[in-house]
Image (tube, rainbow, N blue to C red):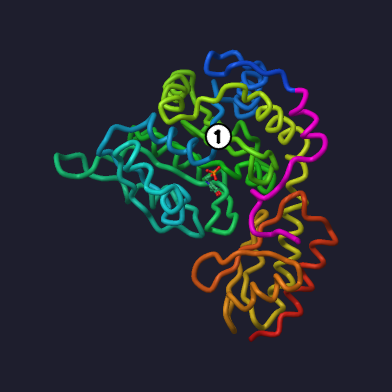
Amino acid sequence: MIDLRSDTVTTPTEGMWDAMYKAPVGDDVFGEDPGLKALEEKIARLFGMEGGVFVPSGTMGNQIGLKVHTQPADEVIIDENAHIYHSEGAAGGLISGIQLRPVRGERGVLTAAQVNAAVREQNDWDPHSRVVALENTSNKGGGTCYPLETIREIFHFTREKELALHLDGARIWNAAVATGTQLADYGSLCDTISVCFSKGLGAPVGSMLLGSRDVIKKARRFRKILGGGMRQAGMLAAAASYAVDHHYEKLEHDHRKAKKLAETVVSSPFFEVEPSHVETNIVLFRVIRGSVENALAWFLSQDVAMIPFGENTIRATFHFQISESDLEKAMRAVASYKGE
Ligand SMILES: Cc1ncc(COP(=O)(O)O)c(C=O)c1O
């Protein structure tokens, strides 16, 4: 099965298993797991930030990121396509007592002017604008990247208005590769960044929240409260570290393959895609004749799995375990689709 449903479906390679098997471990709640400590330092250094805390999931990274910046009844300005808004079970309300203010960006990307327009008046009745949360790349936007300049403008604006800037960087690695941006440039413009090792990088589990020393101290406490304090998690740190060292550089191939699939999609009379919108490893395409269900069933009959992704839309996501011949098979499955 050629699994293009998500970049979360990868399984550990032999090298990664080996690194996990050999990982030194200790009790991380006591601060004694050497591998985990080393990973936190290594990733913080990569992003030029003061510290990091390893968490089980991107959702927990985001939610702790919001928690450290807010008080109950605060508001977070966010794109209407964001994962935090759609896919984290309204956790911001449950955990932090906050409200999200969705804003319509362009394929998941906001401008400083849009953020500006969403900030509330300071009075006794408006919610208190407190955080701007960006997502880079934007999953529902189709793997879109923020231009660094846009993040910089938003950053300056947040400083002026005394807002915090959180970045959901589940796929920040893809954004960095696609735009040729240094990870430390993102780090210099954000108060907190949540990064995932378990998307295109291919680790089985794990994310990290990055921020200042003070923020990370607070974040550690919230992680424990939320049940995210793990004990001998060094084996997960070993997988994450291996993923950064060995798979980060492979992401550009995923992006190239996604673009190639889009070229096939665009020449089918049944589908619609704008190839220039494919910026990273995600291809979103619309079904313009026939149904999403039929198209997905046809692909599956050709041994290719994709997923429905919003109205009349299908998502195909590339990762390093999709080979060139897998790509060709997927292209043939798209090209041979004949409708109902
Ligand atoms: C953009 C984005 N942020 C956060 C997450 C959450 O990650 P996790 O599934 O590890 O909680 C995802 C998951 O797909 C995502 O796509």
Q: Mark 1 points at which residue?
A: 56
Image check: 1 left or right of 118?
A: right
Q: What element carries label 1?
A: loop
Quick one: which residue is furthest to the right in this view? 325
For badge 1, the amino acid type reads Pro
- Residue 82: x and y, percent? 46, 52
Q: Quadrant of the C terminus?
A: bottom right
Image check: 3 left or right of 49?
A: right
- Asked if the stretch drawn in magenta spans residue 66, the answer is no
The structure residue drawn at horizontal position 76% and vertical position 59%, both measured from the top left corner, is 257
Q: How crowded is mark 1: few (under 14 residues within 10 Å), some or many (20 or more)?
A: many
- Residue 275: x and y, percent? 66, 67
Quick one: which residue is furthest to the left in this view? 124
Is ligand 1 within 8 Å of the beta carbon of the residue shown at mark 1?
Answer: yes
- Residue 149: x and y, percent? 54, 44
Write down the region rendered in magenta: 1-22
- Asked if the stretch drawn in magenta spans residue 13, the answer is yes
Q: Nearer the viewer, residue 187 or 325?
A: 325
Q: Quadrant of residue 53?
A: top right
* Vertical relation: 335 (above or below) 26: below
Q: Quadrant of the N terminus?
A: bottom right
The structure residue drawn at horizontal position 40% and vertical position 36%, both measured from the top left corner, is 66
